[in-house]
Amino acid sequence: MEKLINKENIVIGISACLIGEKVRFDASNKPSNFCINELGQHVTYKAYCPEVAIGMPIPRPTIRQIKKDDVIHVSRPDGSGDVTEALQAYGKKIAALSSNLSGYVFCAKSPSCGMERVKVYSPEGNPLVATGVGVFAQEIMKANPLLPCEENGRLNDPIIRENFVARVFAYRHWQILVEEGITKHKLMTFHSHYKYMVMSHDLVAYKNLGRLLARADLAVEEMASQYISGLMAALKIKATRKKHANTLYHMIGYFSDHLTPEQRQELCQQVEGYRNGLMPLVVPLTLINHYLMIHPKSYLAKQVYLNPYPQQLKLRYSY
């Protein structure tokens, strides 16, 4: 599937300050090294700064989320210059135009772009529990519940980073399928390529998606809708070393008749070494790919799990 994706046709929305645009309130930026220098080599960004887009100047007075009578408003700290409705309207506008996006990276803690844990204040200026969601970000996520979204700060975590990128590429694969026109056969083929990917995240979802595709009482459109919802929910669950090890052992089974006892022992030792945190995932995967070249298995070779995104990102080297 990777051949279907290139830098030009996988588009990710991003807060403009994260790719170096000096659009923050103090005319600064918050460039993300990962977004610019690593992921940026494989995707195309569509940058947005909602505060500038609604007419706020650079530089500009700070704004914050203020809770009054259980309603969140976004304004200057003294309550003047309310931009809540303007940010909401712009969010709805961009959400309606963002069907081609395969993911979104938001600027953390921003009253307009933060995904979660945005600071909220009382009208008197006292800090409340930081449970706010950026007004613009909220509209994007509400309109596109399947869209993979993350914040720049969370992407410093290697597991969260890998999970986000895997979801972005999976979602783009799905968008390509939709663009080509979904049939029951194409849906079954798509699922067959993602079986081990899903298994490494959620074994229950793996079984449920299989049962879904076995149903004969659903129109293909409804089946596809339920399938992609289930797939994206499953992939959002973080894969663990235990789940990865279980998936790797399933793959090893394909080589049972080809490996010597010594080769099989070496492979199992690498899987156990990974399970116990002694080596990164790339180590057992490299050996499995090596045996796959020597003993070709068509079904296994098509598994997205083996190459879910460009290898140059090296996302499986750090966990």
Image: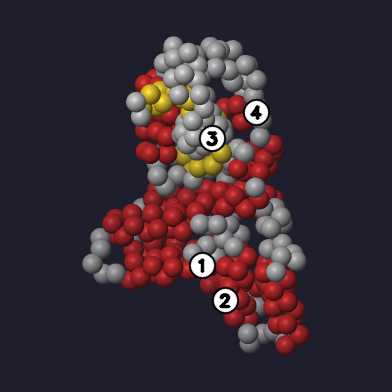
Callout 4 amino acid: Lys
Callout 1 amino acid: Met
Q: CA distance from mark 3 to mark 2?
A: 37 Å
Q: Position of residue 145 (x, y in %)?
A: 40, 44
| 154 or 97, nearer to the observer | 154
User: Residue 185 lies in what quarter of the image?
Assistant: bottom left
Q: Is residue 279 left or right of residue 183?
A: right
Q: CA distance from mark 3 to mark 4?
A: 11 Å
Earlier-in-chain disc, 3 versus 2: 3
Q: CA distance from mark 4 to mark 1?
A: 36 Å
Q: Residue at x 50, y 42 (%)?
A: 149
Q: Position of residue 201 (x, y in %)?
A: 52, 62
Whether residue 303 appears in this view of the structure is no
Total marks shown come to 4
Q: Which mark is residue 30?
A: 4
Earlier-in-chain disc, 1 versus 2: 1
Earlier-in-chain disc, 3 versus 1: 3
Element type where label 1 sits in the image? helix
Q: Which residue is mark 3?
A: 106
Q: Residues within 10 Å of mark 3 (few under 14, many from 20)?
A: many
Callout 3 amino acid: Phe
Earlier-in-chain disc, 3 versus 4: 4
Q: CA distance from mark 1 to mark 2?
A: 10 Å
Earlier-in-chain disc, 4 versus 2: 4
Circles 4 and 1, Cβ within 8 Å, touching? The answer is no
Element type where label 4 sits in the image? loop
| 199 or 135, nearer to the observer | 135
Q: Residue at x 67, y 69 (%)?
A: 275
Q: Which residue is mark 1?
A: 199
Circles 1 and 2, Cβ within 8 Å, touching? The answer is yes
Q: Position of residue 41 (x, y in %)?
A: 66, 41
Q: Position of residue 59 (x, y in %)?
A: 59, 12
